[in-house]
Amino acid sequence: MTDTASQATTSPKKRGFIETLELDTRLLGMIGAFILVCIAFNIVTDGRFLTARNIFNLTIQTVSVAIMATGMVFIIVTRHIDLSVGSLLATCSATMAMMQTAVLPGWLGLELGSPLIAPITILVGLLVGALIGSFHGYLVGYLGIPAFIVTLGGLLVWRNVAWYLTNGQTIGPLDETYVDLGGISGTLGETGSWILGLIAVLGALYAIWNGRRAKIAHKFPVKPIWAEMLVATVIIAVILGFVWILNSYQIPGPRLERQFEARGETMPDGYTAAYGVPYSVLLLIGVAVVMTVVARRTRLGRYIFATGGNPDAAELSGINTRLLTVKVFAIMGALCALAGMVASARLSFHSNDIGTLDELRVIAAAVIGGTALSGGIGTIYGAILGALIMQSLQSGMAMVGVDAPLQNIVVGAVLVFAVLIDIIYRKRTGAV
């Protein structure tokens, strides 16, 4: 009897299907919610929501909010908040617009079309965003002013600074190379998109193989081969499916004719071409990869999550939490500049209302993506998925004909509901 009892206590617990695959149940729930939203809107719009054209537009509309949401993860993880991101985006956008149309032509004689316009403009925008973000971080970290107050003031200040920079005028047209980064004018095309898809597939397979090898080297338990193959198959299907959908959106004939005419050529009869993956999506992928590496593989990332988990213990262990706060807000500021570049490039001009209510969308995306307001917990991919869910809701409601005020009501309700679900989930899983 003793031997039988000891064998029963030492025998490994049988794992379920989800546990064997080592999947995040919360992430699965978010994906499921996103799929349901897409299916519901597709039914209501008579199949127009899931067309290649709408998915293409949905991706480029999501980019600016998703970029800022990755930075908001770090802000919220360290137990702060940033209400100024929409206004800071507007200031950076106004700065970059004035650089292209007034400063560079007037000071350096660089007219629109010069290859130096775009890189100088973007560099200045990033510098302005990082400096403003650092200033916010200094006020919070070193002077002890609550982040809510600092960034609430920033919301009012920087929105009106943007207005004064442009004298309240719409600024445009912007440089063509700069506009290409907005998504509509700049895409990889069909062949380039397939090449990117294959590179992404190889990168995903390498990451899976390298992760398994590292676990084996450290004698950690690994998933069965069939589970690894199933996960890899799903990832490959998602990547190639996404590329296929974007390649299914054909460039309109008149636009193709204008492109050929601009090159002094005649478009052949029956010629067609696809948009493919936009440059702005490439930028978002790059930001996501860099931010994920920072969060998981660098000392800065470990300090951010350690500080969010227990600020007092982090400070006692030697982490300079004040300087860390400055760094986190500086990163947020630089990402606001990148988002401002994408937003103004997509419109091909700077407008005074650019970035309005983006603070709501960015915070909602991070929270819906699983970032805990109590700090210490959050993922980059979750924030991007949250941004995609938010944009899907807004785009779907716009296609149905829902008024803008009601759209904001729905978004606010979804945010509160997401926080409630997160609280319930963490209590049941013992995360809080």
Image: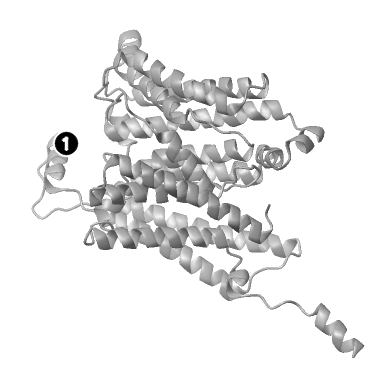
User: In the displayed structure, would residue 109 be above or below residue 432?
Assistant: above
Residue 188 vs residue 10, the one in the foreground: 10
Q: Residue at x 35, y 51 (%)?
A: 392
Q: Is residue 239 visible?
A: no
Q: Is residue 174 visible?
A: yes
User: In the displayed structure, would residue 409 be above or below residue 45?
Assistant: above
Q: Secondary structure at mark 1?
A: loop
Q: Position of residue 236 (x, y in %)?
A: 45, 63
Q: Residue at x 53, y 20 (%)?
A: 131
Name the quadrant of the N terminus. bottom right
The residue that disc 1 covers is 263
Quarter of the image for residue 17 reads bottom right
Q: Residue at x 38, y 54 (%)?
A: 195
Residue 220 vs residue 196, the one in the foreground: 220
- The residue at the far right in this view is 2
Q: Residue at x 76, y 65 (%)?
A: 219
Residue 39 vs residue 23, the one in the foreground: 39
Q: Position of residue 132 (x, y in %)?
A: 52, 21
Q: How many residues crowd mark 1 within 10 Å: few (<14), some (14–19), many (20+)?
A: few
- Judge left or right: residue 153 versus residue 388: right
Residue 281 vs residue 18, the one in the foreground: 18
Amino acid bearing label 1: Arg
Quarter of the image for residue 74 reads top right
Figure label count: 1
- The residue at the far bottom in this view is 1
